[in-house]
Image (spheres, rainbow, N blue to C red):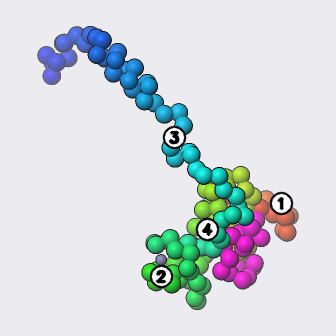
């Protein structure tokens, strides 16, 4: 190791070539950034199954059940997962009870949606107009 450390490191043309090559390969726009354009209105609504990502899910006894793979998930957890998807798809969107109710589709009760949001996020603004941020 000592011997190796004693060896002077001199940069030669090959190093310069390698450095230039690495710089030329640097991607400023990542391929993952190139998402196709989409709007809220265009997207299919409803909760995806956490396992097989099917939209064919139903609510049974406070659980979200996938009719394809039979995976079960607590409803509250599924609602929160759905909110996180919304935030990922639309980083600037304001998370409101009405929006999540529309996005989630399979829960009739606005109260259920609101309860889950109140329990897990901070409400900003007055009741009907409030939106939610991470606690
Ligand atoms: Zn499934």
Q: CA distance from mark 2 to mark 3?
A: 34 Å
Q: Residues within 10 Å of mark 3 (few under 14, many from 20)?
A: few
Residue 111 lies in the magenta-colored region: yes
Q: Check whether the beta carbons of the residues at disc 1 and disc 2 lie within 8 A of each other.
A: no
First of labels 2, 3 by sequence position: 3
Q: Position of residue 33 (x, y in %)?
A: 56, 45
First of labels 1, 4 by sequence position: 4
Q: Residues within 10 Å of mark 2 (few under 14, many from 20)?
A: few
Residue of label 2: 68
Please report the bounds of the magenta region as a residue range. 96-112
Q: Is residue 70 above or below residue 87?
A: below
Q: Check whether the beta carbons of the residues at disc 4 and disc 3 lie within 8 A of each other.
A: no
SS assignment at label 1: loop
Q: CA distance from mark 1 to mark 3?
A: 37 Å
Q: Which image quarter holds the C terminus?
A: bottom right
Q: Which mark lies nearer to you, 1 or 4?
A: 4
Q: Is mark 2 within 8 Å of ligand 1?
A: yes
Residue in the foreground of this view, choosing between 8 and 34: 34
Residue of label 3: 30
Q: Can residue 83 be seen in this snapshot?
A: yes
Q: Mark number for residue 82?
A: 4
First of labels 1, 2 by sequence position: 2
Q: Position of residue 49 (x, y in %)?
A: 52, 74
């Amino acid at each position: 190791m000592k011997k190796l450390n004693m060896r002077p490191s001199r940069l030669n043309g090959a190093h310069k070539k390698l450095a230039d090559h690495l710089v030329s390969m640097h991607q400023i726009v990542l391929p993952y950034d190139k998402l196709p354009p989409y709007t809220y209105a265009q997207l299919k609504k409803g909760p995806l199954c956490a396992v097989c990502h099917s939209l064919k899910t139903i609510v049974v006894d406070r659980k979200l059940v996938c009719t394809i793979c039979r995976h079960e998930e607590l409803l509250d957890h599924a609602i929160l997962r759905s909110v996180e998807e919304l935030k990922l798809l639309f980083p600037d969107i304001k998370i409101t009870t009405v929006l999540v109710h529309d996005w989630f589709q399979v829960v009739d009760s606005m109260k259920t949606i609101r309860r889950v949001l109140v329990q897990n996020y901070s409400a900003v603004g007055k009741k009907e107009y409030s939106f939610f941020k991470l606690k």
